[in-house]
Image: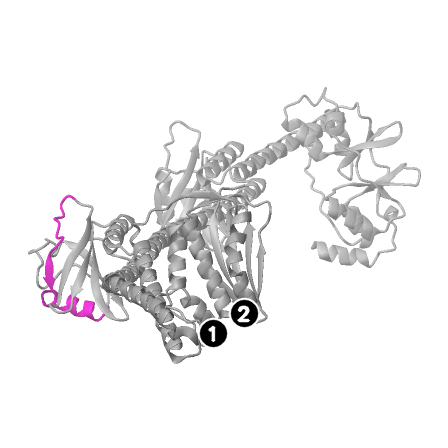
Amino acid sequence: MTVSGVFSLLYGHMQVPSANAMCQLPLTLEPGATILEAIQRLSQSQVGCVLVLEQQQLVGLCTEQDCLRAIATGVDPETTTIADFMTRSPITLRDSEALSTAWQVMQHHRLQHLPVVDQTGQVLGVLTERSLLQAVDPDIWLEAPTQPLPSGSSAYEREGIDRRRFYDQLQLRAQREEALNRVIQAIRNSLDLDTVFGTATAEIAQLLQADRADIIQYLPARPVWKVVSDSHYQVRLTSIAGMEFADDANQPISQLKQLEVVQLEDVAQHPDATVSQYAQFLPGTWLLVPLHFEAKLWGCLALIRDHQQPWQEAEVELARAVVDQLSIAIQQSQLYQQVRQLNETLENQVQERTAQLRKALDYEALLKRITDRVRDSLDERHILQTTVQELAAELDVLCCDTGLYDPECSTITICYEAIRSDNFATAKGAVISLETLSTIGEQTLQGQWIQFCSLSSPLDAFRAVSHRFTILSCPLIDNQGILGDMWLFRPCDQCFDDSEIRLVQQVANQCAIALRQSRLYQEIQAQVSNLEQLNYLKDDFLSSVSHELRTPMANIKMATQMLEILFKQMGVFNHESSRISQYFKVLQDECQREINLINNLLDLSRVESGDDPLTLTTKDLQSWIPGIANVFVDRAKSQQQTLLVEVPSRLPPLTTDFSYLERILTELLHNAFKYTPPGETVGVFTITTSNHLQIHVRNTGVELGKNELDRIFDKFYRIPNSDPWKHGGTGLGLALVKRLTEHLGASIHAESENGQTTFIITFPTEPM
């Protein structure tokens, strides 16, 4: 009957109290009783246990298993007390509890005996599984094994025989349980089948007094039966470990394949010759127990001993129990092997993936270095030579070279190479015709990479590479066409994988960018050089013309001055509104304008040449700046403008060439008054920071656009339609201001917003 069936049966008697099913008047002992006394009482007990009471209180239970455990330890049962081996503080049940509750408690705690107590804790009886079932259904019959005693024995002799027989049975059961426990322990402690098999065969051979105990594995693929473990205890017997038996179509083998236990009383007397033939070296009675799991035969446990000792049912059961444990061991070992194999596979995958990630990181780092180098440098030679060296080292190739394409001659010239093998000859400077490369040259012109290990036309003329190396050719190409190619060489038994090819393609793209940038830079540099040459020629021409015009203009000015004296003596200028006076005034103004233009050109040329040394002095700006600004007071009044000067009293002294600074400030104020409408303000301010001193010249009523601010310091540039006073100018004033400011080691820039324009001169100072 199954556990669920028993519980269903008990559930129908839920209200039946447990007291109705207990065995009353159980046998009792005191804790000081001996093991032998307990065995004697157990032989008289109907429930298989003895209650241990101390001062009428239950302190423990003594069962057959407790006695077995004590005997297995080797103690003397006549002197050893049960106190050391009994089950202490047993679980109890109240007599009012239902049968179903009793069954649940026994199943949950795996109890064979459950004492029943009343409200005061006094023991009333003991419940067992048998008593529970008989209380539910009296027709349930459980066999009580008995064995007849020899006739004619006295009561004393019968008691002694019963005691000795029971003692021997207990000891045998204890030995078998201990042997089975050792097999189980071996399975728990080791996943090595050889160790488990060795322990199992040795234990069962010794316990069952078998001449030989073997574990035989069935190998259906061959098909044979192979002895994988052998234990024997007679010197004359030899080991048969590793021996193989044919998979004959006889009855014992058929029974094993049907997972049946096979017993052969005397193998020599077996009618099948395929079986009796083994009697020559394996005589006796055989016990073959199939070893299987998941309904699949794995092998068998073979036990052999003298044919005069037939196998008992208890021995067969023990062999079955051992085989069950071996099945568990085999399953555990196979699972362990699978897990280990999976772990090894996973570890290999992890290592492979880690290597791939490490390689990818190395490739990424290399590509970043090359990209940074391309971005930060325009030196084609340095970029490409360093690139081929790093790429050759990263991919561990024998050689890496880069050739530049000449579209006019349809050739490639090897310009850069990195050789990492002593057997590789240099080919730097070699010129290769694309026609010589045939298919490879065509694919290069089409912008395709190619990997090959032989050529129809050998290239031994410049490098012995034919039929001896794996070669990867990758073009250097951009949106404007082919710039060259890159070749990498490896031994012929090694190929380039996809990740390496992708890296080479990315490196080739960066090299193409570097080449294009370098060539554009060279073109720009050539254009800049030409422009600088033209600018130098222009400045030289202007300087020469200015020098040539300076003397005539000086003579013209002197002549006009003489004419002015003569005309005054003649009374020609008595009327200022006369035409002669007006014409003479125009002559004087234009003469002075041309002289100023010539002087500005000469000063600008002298400053740009750097031949004009500085005369450094140190002054306080608090008194110096107002002196420069006072010159423009009358002009501000005449033009209805306001002049503001704000210089802090705690201003550090400035060391510079004040003749240049005076000219700069004067030119800026002159421009401010020239372009400021009436009613507006012109101001001079100073600002100091921890590292700079700034002089601001600001005028309101005028705001410049961004395009005008970008060009305001260019030579000969004049802001159109922004001179309300019609003073005119040469367009060199602010250009000269910028050059003079830079000559002083300062800087100048203009800002214009909110209806005002400010020119800011910045001098660096020591930290305060």
- Give the x, y percent position of residue 544: 23, 62
Q: Secondary structure at mark 2?
A: loop
State the residue at coordinates (74%, 42%).
112
- Give the x, y percent position of residue 230: 42, 36
- Apparent side of residue 758 relative to residue 396 in the rendered image (left or right): right
What is the number of the mark on residue 66? none
- Closer to viewer: mark 1 or mark 2: 2
Magenta range is 422-447
Residue 271 seen by the camera: no
Q: Nearest the camera: 585 or 524?
A: 585
- Give the x, y percent position of residue 73: 64, 26
- Which residue is under mark 1? 722
State the residue at coordinates (39%, 50%).
358
Q: Is residue 358 above or below residue 498?
A: above
Residue 492 placement: quadrant: bottom left
Residue 594 placement: quadrant: bottom left
- Which residue is under mark 2? 639
> Identity of the amino acid at label 2?
Gln
Q: Would you say residue 443 sits in the magenta stretch?
A: yes
Residue at the limit of the structure toward the right, as seen here: 120
State the residue at coordinates (33%, 47%).
613
Q: Nearest the camera: 417 or 708?
A: 708
> Identity of the amino acid at label 1?
Ser
